[in-house]
Amino acid sequence: MLPDNMLSVTLSKRLGDFSLHMEFRLAERSVCALFGPSGSGKSTLINCIAGLLKPDAGRIECDGDIWFDAEQGIHLPPERREIGYVFQDGRLFPHLRVRENLLFGQRFRPGRPGNGADLSLEDAVELLGIAHLLRRMPATLSGGEKQRVAIGRALLRRPRLLLMDEPLAALDPSRRAELMEYIARIPDAWNVPILHVTHSVEEALRLAPSTLLIRNGRAEAFGPTRDVLQKAGAPSPFLHHPSSPTGDCHASIRTENPHAHRLSA
Ligand code: ADP
Ligand code: MG
Protein backbone atom coordinates (compact mmCIF):
# COMPACT_ATOMS: atom_id res chain seq x y z
CA MET A 1 0.00 0.00 0.00
CA LEU A 2 1.26 3.48 -0.79
CA PRO A 3 1.80 5.86 2.10
CA ASP A 4 -0.46 8.91 2.32
CA ASN A 5 0.36 11.63 -0.15
CA MET A 6 2.81 14.18 1.12
CA LEU A 7 1.87 16.58 -1.64
CA SER A 8 -1.12 16.46 -3.93
CA VAL A 9 -1.43 18.98 -6.74
CA THR A 10 -4.17 19.55 -9.30
CA LEU A 11 -4.13 22.93 -10.93
CA SER A 12 -4.65 25.08 -13.98
CA LYS A 13 -3.09 28.47 -14.46
CA ARG A 14 -3.15 30.77 -17.46
CA LEU A 15 -0.49 33.46 -17.95
CA GLY A 16 -0.88 35.32 -21.23
CA ASP A 17 -0.58 32.73 -24.01
CA PHE A 18 0.83 30.11 -21.66
CA SER A 19 -1.30 27.61 -19.83
CA LEU A 20 -0.24 25.20 -17.10
CA HIS A 21 -2.29 22.08 -16.34
CA MET A 22 -0.85 19.81 -13.69
CA GLU A 23 -1.95 16.82 -11.75
CA PHE A 24 0.46 14.82 -9.62
CA ARG A 25 0.83 13.20 -6.23
CA LEU A 26 4.03 12.85 -4.32
CA ALA A 27 4.14 10.23 -1.61
CA GLU A 28 7.78 10.24 -0.60
CA ARG A 29 9.36 12.73 1.77
CA SER A 30 12.47 12.99 -0.37
CA VAL A 31 13.78 15.03 -3.28
CA CYS A 32 11.77 15.33 -6.47
CA ALA A 33 13.27 17.14 -9.44
CA LEU A 34 10.98 19.27 -11.59
CA PHE A 35 12.75 18.89 -14.89
CA GLY A 36 12.00 20.56 -18.18
CA PRO A 37 13.19 23.07 -20.75
CA SER A 38 13.15 26.80 -20.18
CA GLY A 39 9.63 28.18 -20.49
CA SER A 40 7.93 24.84 -19.76
CA GLY A 41 6.22 26.15 -16.60
CA LYS A 42 8.48 24.97 -13.75
CA SER A 43 8.62 28.32 -11.95
CA THR A 44 4.91 28.90 -12.51
CA LEU A 45 4.21 25.53 -10.88
CA ILE A 46 6.32 26.10 -7.78
CA ASN A 47 5.07 29.66 -7.42
CA CYS A 48 1.53 28.23 -7.34
CA ILE A 49 2.60 25.69 -4.71
CA ALA A 50 4.32 28.44 -2.71
CA GLY A 51 1.24 30.66 -2.83
CA LEU A 52 3.00 33.42 -4.78
CA LEU A 53 0.66 32.79 -7.71
CA LYS A 54 -3.01 31.87 -7.46
CA PRO A 55 -4.12 29.06 -9.78
CA ASP A 56 -7.32 29.55 -11.79
CA ALA A 57 -8.65 26.17 -10.72
CA GLY A 58 -7.70 23.07 -8.75
CA ARG A 59 -6.53 22.02 -5.33
CA ILE A 60 -3.19 21.80 -3.52
CA GLU A 61 -2.83 19.73 -0.38
CA CYS A 62 0.24 19.11 1.78
CA ASP A 63 0.24 16.42 4.47
CA GLY A 64 -3.55 16.59 4.59
CA ASP A 65 -3.77 20.39 4.92
CA ILE A 66 -5.49 22.31 2.13
CA TRP A 67 -3.32 25.15 0.81
CA PHE A 68 -5.50 25.96 -2.17
CA ASP A 69 -8.97 24.92 -3.20
CA ALA A 70 -10.67 26.95 -5.90
CA GLU A 71 -14.13 25.52 -5.21
CA GLN A 72 -13.96 26.18 -1.47
CA GLY A 73 -12.32 29.57 -2.00
CA ILE A 74 -9.21 28.61 -0.02
CA HIS A 75 -5.90 30.28 -0.90
CA LEU A 76 -3.45 30.36 2.01
CA PRO A 77 -0.80 33.10 1.84
CA PRO A 78 2.81 31.88 1.47
CA GLU A 79 3.71 32.38 5.15
CA ARG A 80 0.91 30.08 6.28
CA ARG A 81 2.09 27.28 4.00
CA GLU A 82 5.29 26.90 6.03
CA ILE A 83 7.53 26.49 3.02
CA GLY A 84 11.16 27.31 2.45
CA TYR A 85 11.94 28.89 -0.92
CA VAL A 86 15.40 29.25 -2.47
CA PHE A 87 15.50 31.40 -5.60
CA GLN A 88 18.09 31.24 -8.37
CA ASP A 89 19.64 34.50 -7.20
CA GLY A 90 19.61 33.91 -3.43
CA ARG A 91 17.77 37.11 -2.51
CA LEU A 92 19.52 37.68 0.82
CA PHE A 93 18.69 40.83 2.75
CA PRO A 94 21.52 43.11 1.61
CA HIS A 95 21.62 45.19 4.80
CA LEU A 96 21.90 42.20 7.16
CA ARG A 97 25.00 40.17 7.97
CA VAL A 98 24.96 36.47 7.13
CA ARG A 99 24.16 35.53 10.73
CA GLU A 100 21.16 37.90 10.82
CA ASN A 101 19.98 36.62 7.44
CA LEU A 102 20.00 33.10 8.86
CA LEU A 103 18.23 34.12 12.06
CA PHE A 104 15.55 35.97 10.12
CA GLY A 105 14.02 32.67 9.11
CA GLN A 106 14.33 31.16 12.56
CA ARG A 107 12.55 34.06 14.23
CA PHE A 108 9.24 33.12 12.64
CA ARG A 109 9.29 29.40 13.04
CA PRO A 110 9.31 27.58 16.34
CA GLY A 111 10.66 24.05 16.13
CA ARG A 112 8.32 21.43 14.81
CA PRO A 113 9.06 17.75 15.37
CA GLY A 114 10.33 15.77 12.43
CA ASN A 115 11.39 18.75 10.33
CA GLY A 116 14.83 19.32 11.73
CA ALA A 117 13.34 20.88 14.85
CA ASP A 118 16.30 19.74 16.88
CA LEU A 119 18.78 21.20 14.41
CA SER A 120 20.15 24.54 15.47
CA LEU A 121 21.69 27.49 13.69
CA GLU A 122 25.07 25.94 14.47
CA ASP A 123 24.03 22.66 12.83
CA ALA A 124 22.87 24.48 9.69
CA VAL A 125 26.10 26.46 9.61
CA GLU A 126 28.16 23.29 9.85
CA LEU A 127 26.05 21.39 7.32
CA LEU A 128 26.49 24.16 4.75
CA GLY A 129 30.11 25.06 5.61
CA ILE A 130 29.37 28.75 6.27
CA ALA A 131 30.83 29.27 9.77
CA HIS A 132 33.53 31.58 8.43
CA LEU A 133 30.92 33.78 6.71
CA LEU A 134 28.67 34.64 9.65
CA ARG A 135 29.92 38.20 10.10
CA ARG A 136 30.08 39.03 6.39
CA MET A 137 27.64 41.22 4.42
CA PRO A 138 25.90 39.55 1.44
CA ALA A 139 27.59 41.86 -1.09
CA THR A 140 30.98 40.39 -0.14
CA LEU A 141 29.95 36.77 -0.82
CA SER A 142 30.51 34.70 -3.96
CA GLY A 143 27.52 33.28 -5.81
CA GLY A 144 27.96 29.83 -4.25
CA GLU A 145 28.35 31.27 -0.75
CA LYS A 146 25.18 33.34 -1.17
CA GLN A 147 23.24 30.26 -2.20
CA ARG A 148 24.50 28.27 0.80
CA VAL A 149 23.32 31.07 3.10
CA ALA A 150 19.97 31.26 1.26
CA ILE A 151 19.52 27.50 1.72
CA GLY A 152 20.42 27.80 5.42
CA ARG A 153 17.90 30.59 5.88
CA ALA A 154 15.17 28.55 4.18
CA LEU A 155 15.98 25.45 6.28
CA LEU A 156 15.95 27.38 9.55
CA ARG A 157 12.29 28.20 8.95
CA ARG A 158 11.84 24.46 9.50
CA PRO A 159 9.67 24.21 6.41
CA ARG A 160 7.22 21.43 5.69
CA LEU A 161 8.38 21.60 2.08
CA LEU A 162 11.52 23.14 0.60
CA LEU A 163 11.15 24.65 -2.88
CA MET A 164 14.31 25.38 -4.86
CA ASP A 165 14.07 27.12 -8.23
CA GLU A 166 17.28 26.45 -10.17
CA PRO A 167 19.45 27.30 -7.14
CA LEU A 168 22.63 26.35 -9.01
CA ALA A 169 21.88 27.81 -12.43
CA ALA A 170 23.83 31.04 -11.90
CA LEU A 171 27.01 29.26 -10.71
CA ASP A 172 30.05 28.16 -12.68
CA PRO A 173 30.53 24.38 -13.05
CA SER A 174 32.98 23.86 -10.18
CA ARG A 175 30.87 25.88 -7.71
CA ARG A 176 27.81 24.01 -8.92
CA ALA A 177 29.44 20.66 -8.17
CA GLU A 178 30.49 21.90 -4.74
CA LEU A 179 27.03 23.17 -3.87
CA MET A 180 25.45 19.93 -5.04
CA GLU A 181 27.47 18.14 -2.36
CA TYR A 182 25.96 20.42 0.28
CA ILE A 183 22.41 20.07 -1.05
CA ALA A 184 22.76 16.29 -1.13
CA ARG A 185 23.22 16.28 2.67
CA ILE A 186 19.91 18.01 3.39
CA PRO A 187 17.35 15.17 3.16
CA ASP A 188 19.12 12.98 5.73
CA ALA A 189 19.97 15.78 8.13
CA TRP A 190 16.68 17.64 7.91
CA ASN A 191 13.99 15.16 6.90
CA VAL A 192 12.37 17.77 4.69
CA PRO A 193 10.81 16.97 1.31
CA ILE A 194 12.28 19.03 -1.52
CA LEU A 195 11.00 20.10 -4.93
CA HIS A 196 14.12 20.98 -6.88
CA VAL A 197 13.57 22.81 -10.17
CA THR A 198 16.29 22.22 -12.70
CA HIS A 199 16.96 21.79 -16.37
CA SER A 200 20.25 20.00 -15.64
CA VAL A 201 20.36 16.24 -16.16
CA GLU A 202 23.37 16.01 -13.88
CA GLU A 203 21.61 17.79 -11.02
CA ALA A 204 18.47 15.69 -11.26
CA LEU A 205 20.52 12.47 -11.24
CA ARG A 206 22.73 13.52 -8.38
CA LEU A 207 20.04 14.92 -6.09
CA ALA A 208 16.63 13.47 -6.82
CA PRO A 209 15.35 9.88 -6.57
CA SER A 210 12.24 10.91 -8.52
CA THR A 211 11.63 13.36 -11.33
CA LEU A 212 8.58 15.05 -12.79
CA LEU A 213 9.14 15.89 -16.44
CA ILE A 214 7.37 19.08 -17.52
CA ARG A 215 6.91 20.18 -21.10
CA ASN A 216 4.66 22.92 -22.43
CA GLY A 217 2.89 23.29 -19.10
CA ARG A 218 2.03 19.57 -18.86
CA ALA A 219 3.37 16.73 -16.73
CA GLU A 220 4.76 14.29 -19.29
CA ALA A 221 6.28 11.66 -17.03
CA PHE A 222 6.84 11.01 -13.36
CA GLY A 223 8.90 8.33 -11.71
CA PRO A 224 12.47 7.23 -10.95
CA THR A 225 14.82 9.92 -12.24
CA ARG A 226 16.86 7.67 -14.51
CA ASP A 227 13.77 6.34 -16.29
CA VAL A 228 12.21 9.76 -16.71
CA LEU A 229 15.43 11.25 -18.07
CA GLN A 230 15.75 8.39 -20.51
CA LYS A 231 12.24 9.17 -21.75
CA ALA A 232 13.22 12.82 -21.97
CA GLY A 233 16.10 11.86 -24.28
CA ALA A 234 18.99 12.66 -21.93
CA PRO A 235 22.42 11.70 -23.32
CA SER A 236 23.26 8.19 -22.15
CA PRO A 237 26.68 8.86 -20.49
CA PHE A 238 24.81 10.84 -17.84
CA LEU A 239 22.50 7.96 -17.12
CA HIS A 240 25.43 5.89 -15.87
CA HIS A 241 26.45 8.55 -13.41
CA PRO A 242 27.81 6.63 -10.41
CA SER A 243 26.53 8.83 -7.58
CA SER A 244 22.86 9.21 -8.32
CA PRO A 245 20.59 8.41 -5.39
CA THR A 246 18.48 5.31 -5.53
CA GLY A 247 15.49 4.20 -3.56
CA ASP A 248 11.80 3.58 -3.92
CA CYS A 249 9.78 6.16 -5.68
CA HIS A 250 6.05 6.41 -5.17
CA ALA A 251 4.69 9.05 -7.43
CA SER A 252 1.88 9.27 -9.88
CA ILE A 253 0.48 11.60 -12.46
CA ARG A 254 -2.81 11.71 -14.22
CA THR A 255 -3.11 13.90 -17.23
CA GLU A 256 -5.23 14.43 -20.29
CA ASN A 257 -2.12 14.45 -22.40
CA PRO A 258 -2.23 11.36 -24.64
CA HIS A 259 1.57 11.33 -24.90
CA ALA A 260 2.10 11.18 -21.16
CA HIS A 261 3.95 8.24 -19.69
CA ARG A 262 3.17 6.78 -16.35
CA LEU A 263 6.14 5.33 -14.55
CA SER A 264 6.33 3.63 -11.24
CA ALA A 265 8.90 1.74 -9.24
P1 ADP B 1 10.29 27.89 -16.58
O1 ADP B 1 10.45 28.20 -15.13
O2 ADP B 1 10.06 26.42 -16.86
O3 ADP B 1 11.41 28.42 -17.42
P2 ADP B 1 8.02 29.71 -16.40
O4 ADP B 1 7.09 29.03 -15.49
O5 ADP B 1 8.84 30.81 -15.86
O6 ADP B 1 8.96 28.59 -17.11
O7 ADP B 1 7.22 30.28 -17.64
C1 ADP B 1 6.35 29.49 -18.40
C2 ADP B 1 5.75 30.32 -19.53
O8 ADP B 1 4.88 31.30 -18.98
C3 ADP B 1 6.78 31.07 -20.35
O9 ADP B 1 6.39 30.99 -21.69
C4 ADP B 1 6.67 32.48 -19.83
O10 ADP B 1 7.01 33.41 -20.84
C5 ADP B 1 5.22 32.57 -19.47
N1 ADP B 1 4.97 33.55 -18.38
C6 ADP B 1 5.50 33.52 -17.15
N2 ADP B 1 5.04 34.55 -16.40
C7 ADP B 1 4.19 35.23 -17.18
C8 ADP B 1 3.36 36.40 -17.02
N3 ADP B 1 3.34 37.05 -15.85
N4 ADP B 1 2.62 36.80 -18.07
C9 ADP B 1 2.61 36.13 -19.24
N5 ADP B 1 3.35 35.03 -19.47
C10 ADP B 1 4.13 34.58 -18.48
MG1 MG C 1 12.00 29.19 -14.14
Image (cartoon, helix red, strand yellow):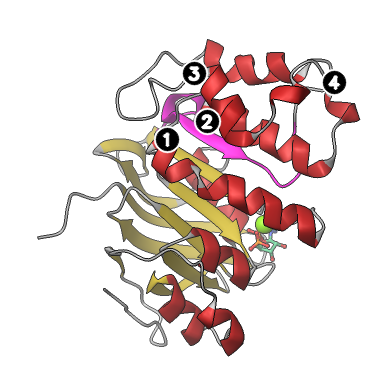
Asked if the residue under mark 1 is in contact with the one under mark 2, i.e. CB atoms within 8 Å, the reply is: yes
The type of residue carrying mark 2 is Leu
The type of residue carrying mark 4 is Met
Circle 4 packing at 10 Å, graded few (<14), some (14-19), many (20+), is some
Could you tell me which residue is drawn at 66 percent across and 67 percent down? 17
The type of residue carrying mark 3 is Ser
Label 2 to label 1: alpha-carbon separation: 8 Å
Label 3 to label 2: alpha-carbon separation: 10 Å
Label 4 to label 3: alpha-carbon separation: 21 Å
Q: Position of residue 19 (x, y in %)?
A: 56, 65
Closer to the chain start, of discs 3 and 2, is 3
Q: Which residue is the site of mark 1?
A: 190
The type of residue carrying mark 1 is Trp
Circle 2 packing at 10 Å, graded few (<14), some (14-19), many (20+), is many
Could you tell me which residue is drawn at 83 percent across and 26 percent down? 138
Q: Is mark 1 within 8 Å of ligand 2?
A: no
Label 2 to label 4: alpha-carbon separation: 20 Å
Closer to the chain start, of discs 4 and 3, is 3
Circle 1 packing at 10 Å, graded few (<14), some (14-19), many (20+), is some
Q: Which residue is the site of mark 4?
A: 137
Q: Which residue is the site of mark 3?
A: 120
Tell me the number on the disc at residue 155.
2
Residue 173 visible at all:
yes
Closer to the chain start, of discs 1 and 3, is 3
Q: Position of residue 66 (x, y in %)?
A: 31, 37
Image depth: mark 3 or mark 2 in front: 3
Magenta run includes residue 84:
yes
